Amino acid sequence: MAPRCLFIFLVLIIASSAAGDMVADTCARCSNGNPNVNYTLCVASLSEYSGSGGADLHGLALISAMPLRSGLASIASEARVLRDRSAPGSAARSCLEACMAVFRDAAFDLGNAVAAMEAWRYGDAKTAMSAAVDAPVTCEDEFKEQGMTAPAGIKAKSKPLFQQGVISLAIISLL
């Protein structure tokens, strides 16, 4: 009986090790194929979600969209707070309202990307995710067009959101 338990234990360890390698291998493939993908961030963000260790590439693509949902909600909330503090009719308020619309559209695009991934329509997922990934850059461009710099709260959330989007897009591209 003991050898059988030992065998099962070894199989579980090997399977667990192989599953963990899937995250690292996927992130390595993404960072090797796209210089904008931060390997360390990729591994950390995917690994923080339960189920990522046993996920296949399709599952990792779906998991990679999770941080984007919360990131978009956070940056949209920041834009709303800043907009409410801005003077009515000011250029800053106008930019923040445009950003809020961009983030609202990005959340819709992200939902479409996830739905397309769930339906195994990776071309559609890639198109929708590309649109969602552009949101932070588009928001900052609104300010640049007015000769202003995006507020610190927006800038601080833009780069991590963009990086997460690039990771998700890179994983979808592997499918």
Image (tube, rainbow, N blue to C red):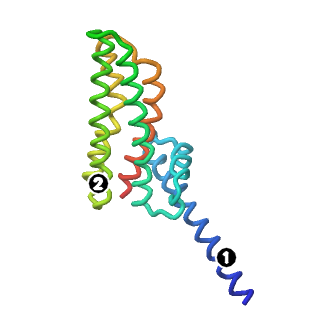
Residue 115, percent from left and from top: 29, 54
Name the residue at the front extreme: 84
Measure the C-alpha gap from mark 1 to mark 2. Answer: 37 Å
Which residue is located at x 47 percent, y 53 percent?
29
The amino acid sitting under disc 2 is Ala
Instruction: Quadrant for residue 80, please give it.
Output: top left
Labelled disc at residue 57: none
Which residue is located at x 55 percent, y 55 percent?
24
Q: Is residue 138 above or below residue 62?
A: above
Q: Secondary structure at mark 1?
A: helix
Q: Is residue 123 visible?
A: yes
Name the residue at the bottom extreme: 1
Q: Quadrant of the N terminus?
A: bottom right
Q: Earlier in the sequence, mark 1 or mark 2?
A: 1
Circle 1 residues within 10 Å: few <14, some 14–19, many ≥20: few
Residue 93, percent from left and from top: 31, 15
Q: Secondary structure at mark 2?
A: helix
Instruction: Quadrant for residue 174, please give it.
Output: bottom left
Circle 2 residues within 10 Å: few <14, some 14–19, many ≥20: some
Residue 128, percent from left and from top: 27, 45
What residue sits right under mark 1 in the picture? 10
In the image: residue 119, left or right of residue 156: left
In the image: residue 157, left or right of residue 121: right
Q: Is residue 87 above or below residue 128?
A: above
Residue 151, percent from left and from top: 42, 18
Nearer to me, 83 or 1: 83
What residue sits right under mark 2 in the picture? 115
| Count of all numbered marks drawn on residues in the image | 2
The amino acid sitting under disc 1 is Leu
Q: Is residue 151 above or below residue 23?
A: above
Nearer to me, 174 or 133: 133
